[in-house]
Each structure stands twice: as C-alpha cells, then as structure tokens.
Image (cartoon, rainbow, N blue to C red):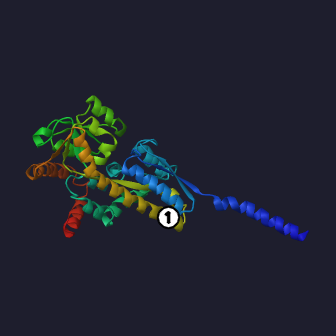
Amino acid sequence: MKICRVILSLFTILALSAPMAQAGMTIKLAHPNVPAHPMGQGYELFKKDLKERSNGFFDVQIYDSSKYGNFDAVAQGISMGVLQMGSDGVSNFSVFNPKLMMFDMPFVIPSYEASDLITDGPIGQELAKGLEANNIIGLGYIEIGFKNIFSDRPIRTLEDAKDLKIRSTHSKAHIELLQSLGMNPTPVAWGEVYTALQQGTVDGIDIDLNLAFFNKFPEITKYVTLTRSVYAPHLVMVSKPFWNKLNEEQQQWIRESFKVMQTFERAEVRKNEEMILKEIIAMGGEVIELTPEERERWVKASQKAVFEKFPVEMSPEIVNAVRETIKKNNM
C-alpha cells in the first residue's frame, strides 16, 4: 500500500510539473512592412530560428503591414508590455529622443559599410538607450536603405525638383530637408501613400528601392532619381517589462535569433537593389543618376538649411562623431 502511495505521488508530481515544463511564451511582434519585403522575410526567419533555438519555448506571432496599428500604437503597446516586440523607422522615434533626428540628416552616411559602423557601434547603441525611459529597449537596427525620389516627372536637377508635391513623414527634419531642396512636402500616412500617388495628391516620394518596389510604387511612378540622400534604418524594439521577466538564457536566445535575422535582412536589401533597378527599366521606367556636380548642389542646398534649423535637437556632437568615425575608417 505504501509503495502504491509513493507511485501515485510520483505520477501526481509529474502531472503537475509537465505543463510547466512545456509552458512557453508568445511574442507579439509588429512591423509596418509587407511579407515579401526582406524585412518581412527576416521576421519569418526570426520566428523560425527562435522557436528552434528555444526548443519551442518561444512562439512569435507577427503583425505585418501595420496590421497592429501605426507607429504610435506599436510604441505604446511595447511601452505598456501588451506588445512584446516591433520595429519602425528611426525618424519616428525622435519624439522620444530628439538625438535620433541624426538619421534624418541628409548626406551624412555615405555607404552601407558606413551605416553598419554607425548603427552597430557605440553611436547607434547610445542613441537607442535614450528610449529606455519609455520602457523601450533597442535590440538593434535593421534597414530600409538609402532614400531616392520616385516621381511622375523626371528629376535631373534642383530646378526640376522645384515645387514637387512630395510625400513626407511628420518628422520636422524630413520636412525641412525637402523644403531646402525646393519641394513641397505633404505629410501622408504610410498606409495611404499608394493611393495618394495614384490619385495625384502627391507627385512623388523619397524612399528606398526595396520599399518602393515591394509596395508596387514603380507601377504608378515612372521615374526614380538616385539621390541617396538619407540612410533610413529601422530600430527593432523589445518591451522592457517583457524583457525583465526573462532569464539570461531566454534573453540570449532572442539576441542570437535577432542577429541571424539582421544579417539576412541587410544582405537581402542590398542584394535586391540591382535587380530592382533592372525591373524598373523593364517596366518602362527611367532610372536617373545625378552627375557628381549636380549631386554636390543637392548636398550644399540641404546641409546649411537642415543643420542650422535644428542645432540643438539633432545634436551637433552626435553628427560630428558620425563624421569623425566615418573619416577615421576611410569610408
């Protein structure tokens, strides 16, 4: 009888402990991009890798294409802990940390090699840390790419750009940049951009090649001018209340799976660009490359206006540190 009670007790312990051993966590993750974009593909890879790495402990539920809501909804959800992860364009975060306006500064970051150096190094990490007061942890940066102008008319010179009705974000620095180049910036919510271009509410948009292509903008804008004016990263966020509930091993699983995703996403964005330009030409579009002399005119027109307009918000010491870092590394 005593043996039976012992066996029964063992079965009871096992029954009670089994659910705990199998219990896991669901990570709700929101981003604004379409699944076909390298970012969308990257998050699917993150989901798969993290599930395997954690032996099924973590499952990731992805809200792509702004299905969770706009930036405000995502940032609030992460801050409150009801959303565990997400990402958005860094320029949107300047409402929390004005120093992040650095990424809206024109013609500062010259190449992808330079962008990796800045975002993955001390400067990028310092900028992300400023969000922790809002319960947002910056896990790291992925990318959109360099902005170019997609428009319904050819833009070969500054004069051609004059009075172009161009979609802008709500970033003050972005608006000032477009105005300094003679354009007429018109803030339009991301989800309404395609319709705005299609209906002529705006004549163009400055955007990277991948984002334009995977959102089908070349279907409705015949010309793309390769200005490469602004490098636009996305910051991947983790909810601080959620993060603090995890042990060190669980946090490390997320970091490692993010690194796999980040490496893949960046490589795909960069690899795609040549293909996209060929596709635009095949569709009957025209790709315009500014001459070195004309590009220098764009640089001069934008630099003084933007940097003098935001001397405090954009933190001159941060911009100077970026330039010094790039120069030191011969980029």
Amino acid type of disc 1?
Trp
When asked about the image quadrant of residue 287, the answer is top left
Asked whether residue 140 is in view, the answer is: no
Asked whether residue 250 is in view, the answer is: yes
* Residue furthest front as drawn: 282
* Residue furthest top as drawn: 199
Q: What x and y, as percent, mark residue 62?
A: 48, 48
Is 133 left or right of 183, judged from the image as shown?
right
Q: What x and y, as percent, mark residue 214?
A: 34, 43
Number of marks in the rendered image = 1
Is 130 left or right of 246, judged from the image as shown?
left
The quarter of the rendered structure image containing the C terminus is: bottom left
Is 288 left or right of 191, judged from the image as shown?
left
Question: Judging from the image, what secondary structure is the residue with disc 1 in?
Answer: helix
Q: Is residue 65 above or below residue 9?
A: above
Neighbour tally class for label 1: few under 14, some 14-19, many 20 plus, Cα within 10 Å: some
* Residue furthest left as drawn: 293
Q: Nearer the viewer, residue 1 or 128?
A: 1
* Residue furthest right as drawn: 1
Q: Residue at x 69, y 61 (%)?
A: 18
Q: What x and y, as percent, mark residue 22?
A: 64, 59
The quarter of the rendered structure image containing the N terminus is: bottom right
Q: Is residue 269 above or below residue 17?
A: above
Q: Is residue 133 above or below residue 284?
A: below
Q: Nearer the viewer, residue 118 or 42?
A: 42
Q: What x and y, as percent, mark residue 121?
A: 32, 66
Label 1: which residue?
Answer: 253
Q: Residue at x 46, y 61 (%)?
A: 257
